[in-house]
Amino acid sequence: MIEPYLAGDDRSTRESVDLRILTLIASLLLAATVSLTFGQVVLRYFFNNPQTWAEEVGRYLFIWITFLGAAVAFARDTHIRVDAVIALLGSKVARGGDLFRRLVEAAAVAMLLYSGILVAWKHRNASFYTMPDMPQVIFYLAVPVGSALALFYVMRGIMRWK
């Protein structure tokens, strides 16, 4: 069984380069969302000049953050799970339950990847209401990209399962 990631753990210094880059990208998107929201508040309440596009972009950036963060959680094996029943049944059952959980995660993320591809494909030619020159597919790609990364990390966890 793979040990879960703990914040003070020395494994945090041994994270793979791809996971560090993914975490950096999600952090930068979070900083952009906070800055955009702060700027929108300042423009709205102090200058009475709200930007209509800022709310829409902030929402889609939040979706990117969510899906990239989910991939990071799968990579670190830190997704929330209820394991009280499995813990009561002993280590052999817990090991089997861990593998079963990983297989269910893989199936769920694969379905999310498939549906995300369908939605992104459907919106491939759409543009924003507030920014007509910006294609919406850039933001709809958050679901398939985040799901593909999550599936990669789930499969890597299955391959490393002992």
Image (spheres, rainbow, N blue to C red):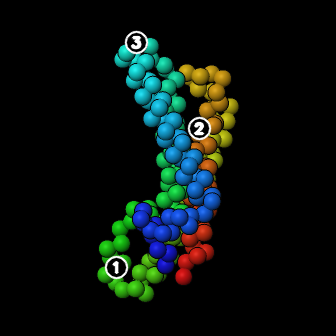
Q: Residue at x 48, y 47 (%)?
A: 66
Provide the residue designation for mark 3.
48
Secondary structure of the residue carrying tag 2 is helix
Other-residue count near label 1 (Cα within 10 Å), few / some / many at <14 / 14–19 / ≥20: some
User: Percent x, y for residue 92?
Assistant: 43, 87
Is residue 120 shown above or below 37? Answer: below
Q: Residue at x 68, y 31 (%)?
A: 125
Provide the residue designation for mark 1.
87
Q: Amino acid at mark 3?
A: Asn
Name which quarter of the figure residue 137 lies in.
Answer: top right
Provide the residue designation for mark 2.
139
Dot placed on the residue nearer the N-terminal end, 1 or 2 = 1
User: Percent x, y for residue 75?
Assistant: 54, 63
- Disc 3 + disc 1, Cβ < 8 Å: no
Dot placed on the residue nearer the N-terminal end, 3 or 2 = 3
Q: Amino acid at mark 1?
A: Ala
Q: Residue at x 47, y 32 (%)?
A: 35
Residue 80 visible within the image: yes
Other-residue count near label 2 (Cα within 10 Å), few / some / many at <14 / 14–19 / ≥20: some
Residue 59 visible within the image: no
Is residue 26 shown above or below 57? Answer: below
Q: How far separated are the C-alphas under marks 3 and 2? A: 28 Å
Is residue 53 shown above or below 161? Answer: above
